[in-house]
Amino acid sequence: MNGSTLAERTVVVTGATRGLGLEAARALAVEPGVSVVLAVRDTQRGATVAAGITGGRAGTGAVVALPLDLADLASVRAFPGVLAAAGLPPLHALVANAGIQYRDRRHTTADGYEATFGVNHLGHFLLVRLLLPVLADDGRVVIVASGTHKARRVRNFGFPPPQWRDPRELATPGPGSGQVAYATSKLANVMTMLELQRRIDAERPGAAIAVHGLDPGLMPATDLSRDFPAPVARLYKRLTPVIERMPGATSTAASGAQLARMAVGPDFAGPGGRYIELTADGAPSAAAREPGPARELWDVSEELTAPGAPRPA
């Protein structure tokens, strides 16, 4: 596909009906000629959100909601056809934003995988692979990462570090901490971001496709705590204005605007492989930069997301 023009391009945002994804969609919708796809599980809610965005912005592109359930690989496989049938301008960027976090590792996807790893990593991994052939030569992939992928408990507000192991084990539900599962899924996101850029550079040289990762900072206004006990969630919500003023924390609106810049802004046209912490260039963890484990993660993820792959025991 030829590169898209500034006047006519489409950006897909996953998890765009609330929180960070919604703010990114709002920021993208004011860009001239940018059509925004809200890739969401609940299309009725998505349509309502899309109408709210179009009613309050001056952009010239469309804002539409299309069905995508990252916890169901059949839904992910169907998405490219749904996107093609929507008749939108060429695909310029994919913003892999949607994410979940539970208290434990016992939740599963429709395919039987551990839900946090399944949604945060496997669903997005398959989506990226399926959309890459139709991504414009000057396109972008922006993956929402997290500082929790680094083993720095103090700077991560006490969040436990990831515990990397065989990706097949990470995809298998069972006992364990949901916070560790989340941090580990974010490590998988950063590993995938870097490995994807390496593969694009090798397989599509000259395509100028840039892959970036964003650590949006601690955003207490998001819904990641919705599975936690009601008293904890209420306390967290009350403390949101205070937490947002702490170093390393921010608002969803600020990080949403940063996501939009990374998807369509000229400063992120290339080279790819940048890891942004809030608004400044940072460095992924040493574990994320290891190419060997990243290749293994890629190969295993291909196996796990293949049609007819056996369900975890």
Image: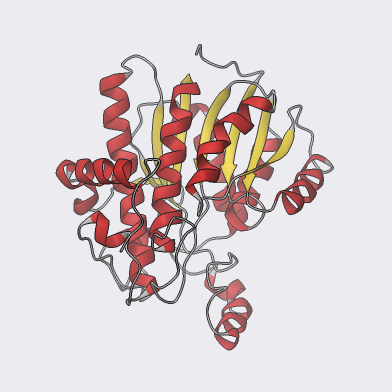
Q: The C terminus is located in which quarter?
A: bottom left
Q: Is 41 placed left or right of 149 in the picture?
A: right
Residue 291 x, y percent position in the rendering: 18, 41
Residue 90 x, y percent position in the rendering: 59, 20
Residue at the top extreme, as displayed: 2
Q: Residue at x 70, y 36 (%)?
A: 29
Vertical placement of residue 17 versus 307, above or below: below
For the residue pair 224 and 126, the one nearer the viewer reads as 126
Q: Is 46 placed left or right of 6 in the picture?
A: right
Residue at the right extreme, as displayed: 55
Residue 241 x, y percent position in the rendering: 61, 72
For the residue pair 26 and 180, the one nearer the viewer reads as 180
Display colour scheme: secondary structure
Residue at the left extreme, as displayed: 292
Residue 272 x, y percent position in the rendering: 35, 31
Vertical placement of residue 273 versus 48, above or below: above
Image quadrant in which you'd find residue 4: top right
Vertical placement of residue 244 versus 4, above or below: below
Q: Residue at x 38, y 72 (%)?
A: 105
For the residue pair 227 and 106, the one nearer the viewer reads as 106
Q: Is 191 placed left or right of 57 in the picture?
A: left
For the residue pair 296 and 294, the one nearer the viewer reads as 296
Q: Is 255 placed left or right of 165 in the picture?
A: right
Q: Which residue is drawn at 46% across and 71% down?
A: 102
Q: Residue at x 39, y 17 (%)?
A: 207
Number of residue marks: 0
